[in-house]
Amino acid sequence: MPPLKYLKVKSYLEQMAVRPESATRMPTVRELMGQFNVSLATVNRALSELENDGVIVRRQGSGIVAAGHNRTVRRLENTHGNGTKNIVFAYNDYPDETTWRTVHSIALYSRMNKCNMLDCKVYPDTSTESLIEFIKAQPDCAGVILRIGSDQMDVERLEALGRLPVTVVVLDSMYFYPNFLPDNIYVLSPDAADCAEKTAEVLLRHGHRQIGFIRNEPRSEYTDLYQKTLVSAFRRAGVEFGSERIFSSTIRSWENSLDAAVQMTRTHLDEIRRLGLTALIYKSAPGALVSLKLLKEAGLRVPEDISLIGEGERSLYRYLSPQLTVVTVDYDKFSCLAVDIALGTQKPKNRNVFFPQELIERESVRDLSCIVEKR
């Protein structure tokens, strides 16, 4: 039996409520009626249930907004010992939009699941012992989400986390640990192979055959798989993509990947011209962004002379000139899945979970297919 119409509206709004922009505006009643082709009564039923569940708030003059932004701020210690479940989210304290969006999504989605998110910022000198002690000290801990970026955990840390009596989700991991994951640990990573395939597909579809790759991120199992998949995808298409078209250097996790992108682009400008490259793939989209100015100063217009594509979305990319084409994870859905696994409401068959990515096509990739066909 297909789900009732109001349940479709309700499910959609639950997903929307997790997004940061829900702080100021969610779809109006009229927009929902048009989008789902339903009556006012159907929309009101969905809204009433969500309001009763504490997911949204309806206010005269301000419309519908996510409830998490309108509640009275409570001191964290007041939530201890009251029987409410807690999720510990431990993450690198790093000034980055993706980090902030992930924190927001996990906090709000945890609240929607009647849990509190307990914030635990991790620094380069944070020891495994202090992290474990913090987790153990939290009452009613239902699960742990750990996001540490491009750093690799050693066996000792994995074993220590494996002794915790709760599920641990390693979120956005660049390493997979397939051979020694304890039974309570899941590793949730963006799908590197999927990202590389989508990157190759959009460039090939638009007629690009002279393509270079700038790896402006630290080497990891993720970046190795991404690069290997790129090579295979272009080889299947008969496109040359050997070592002379792959520009990389040793970048460590604490070094600035933006500076690395600019430096590698500057260093290889002569090769980019000599090889007649029509497109550059940057491992991270921020690297493509900061290279725009350098390429322009070098006389290479984007996308007229050279196209750019990178991995990872930021809100400003759609406001650039040209707007940046990216392949990206939906970090709101990514974060919600981490909460579901931590709470045990989803139990993946495999300890390693690879999250699919999506292509967002914008202006920075030029269509050369017509030119290629004429030739």
Image: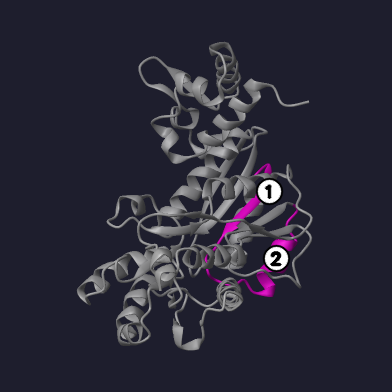
- Check the picture and name the quadrant holding the C terminus: bottom left
Instruction: Indicate the amino acid at tag 1.
Output: Ala
- Residue at x 73% of width, y 70% of height: 178
Q: Quadrant of residue 15?
A: top right
Instruction: Indicate the amino acid at tag 2.
Output: Ala
From the top left corner, tell me how far across and down residue 142 is, in percent: 69, 45
From the top left corner, tell me how far across and down residue 68 is, in percent: 49, 32
Looking at the picture, does residue 277 appear above or below residue 289?
Answer: below
- Check the picture and name the quadrant holding the N terminus: top right
From the top left corner, tell me how far across and down residue 233 is, in percent: 59, 73
Considering the numbered disc 1 on the image, is that residue within a helix, a strand or a loop? Answer: helix
Magenta-tinted stretch: 139-165
From the top left corner, tell me how far across and down residue 4 is, in percent: 69, 21
Work out whether residue 138 can be spotted. Answer: no
Is 135 in front, or is 96? 96
Looking at the picture, does residue 15 appear above or below residue 309?
Answer: above
- Compared across the picture, whether 105 is left or right of 323 comes to right
The crowd level at tag 1 (other Cα within 10 Å; few <14, some 14-19, many 20+) is many
* Residue position for label 2: 160
Is 189 in front, or is 164? 189
Q: How many numbered badges does the structure rendering display?
A: 2
* Residue position for label 1: 342
